[in-house]
Amino acid sequence: MTSTAVYRGMDQSTLDRQYSPSSRVPSLDAYLREYERLSEAARRDHSVRTGLAYGAHPAEVLDYFPGTGSGRSPLLVFVHGGNWQALGRHESAFAVPQLLAAGAAVAVVEYGLAPGVGLDAMVAMVQRAVDWLLHHADRLGFAPDRLHLCGTSAGAQLATMAMVPAPPFGPDVSGRIAGAVLLSGMYDLEPVRLSYVNEALGLDEAGARRNSPIHLLPERLPEVVIALGGNETQEYVRQHERMVTALRRRAATTEIVAQRRNHFDLPYDLGVRGTELGDAVLAQMGLGGATT
């Protein structure tokens, strides 16, 4: 019996596997436990303002780690992944120590998750988080013209949507982002809508299109670092390559494929000098990350 093609010649089980990055690693739980352990250590060992409310929803909170230098630091705003239905700020501070050591301040953003919160609302939440941070830059002590937005996996989609002008729901912060870092993202949500991930998201065709940044990018964008692990599914590779092509017409774009990394450990290189991703991110932030 022949299986029915759902998307680009793939049947349902194949498409579902393509949008399940954990299919490429031995243990997803091991990474989730490590995220939590490293994040707990970051909050224990570094100054942090926890649970700062940036909106009215209970999930609209962030943790802010101030820069350790004497002047106003650039800020990296980190938006976690988890297929829009898992993780939060408590598991997402694992890259903070190396970023602080390099001279950055860091904000770790929490947002509502599916199925309790729809994707339109999540996109607006991340926009509100950026807007709130910019309005409170003086009190927090970072340079408002040096805010860099970083998202991984589902967070990369949310971060990219924050660069889209005139959003239908949240505040327009598109012209106030100094640079973006996009890791292992999904930028066209039509195949996501057709996969198992949509059981929680509940997207229809219009909702998938409305939240697909590949179709919405403005003609000009700030500098972008876009990266992928060497061990990713073919659909994540295809999504990455399409976005790279779209970005290069609009922004100074640094593309990285970290061959020894996968979907889940790629963000560990954020801020780590001597890694391709870490050097590119620090160079974008003006922190001397470039190496020869």
Image (cartoon, rainbow, N blue to C red):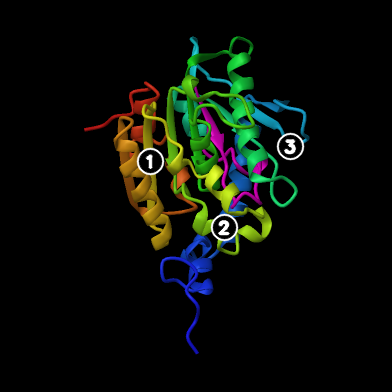
In which quadrant of the rendered image does the C terminus lie? top left
Question: Residue at point 37% right, 55% down?
Answer: 238
Q: What residue type is labelled 2?
A: Arg
The answer to whether residue 162 is visible is yes
Residue 120 image position (x, y, % from top left): 64, 41
> Would you name the residue on which mark 3 appears?
59
Disc 1 marks a residue whose amino acid type is Ile
Q: Which mark is residue 226?
A: 1
Q: Which amino acid does label 3 sit on?
A: Ala
Disc assigned to residue 193:
2
Q: What element carries label 1?
A: strand
Disc number for residue 103: none
Q: Which of marks 1 and 2 is nearer the N terminus?
A: 2
Question: Label 2: few (<14), some or many (≥20) within 10 Å?
Answer: some
Task: For marks 3 and 1, give the CA distance.
Answer: 27 Å
Instruction: Give the residues in magenta.
Output: 75-96
Q: Which residue lies furthest to the left in this view?
A: 292
- Determine whether, in the image, residue 70 is placed left or right of residue 34: left
Task: Residue 269: say if magenta.
Answer: no
Q: In this view, does 197 lie above or below 257?
A: below
Front residue of 18/120: it is 120
Total labels: the figure holds 3
Q: Which of marks 2 and 3 is nearer the N terminus?
A: 3
Question: Where residue 94 appears, x then y in whole percent?
Answer: 55, 40
Query: Is residue 40 at least partly visible in the picture?
Result: no
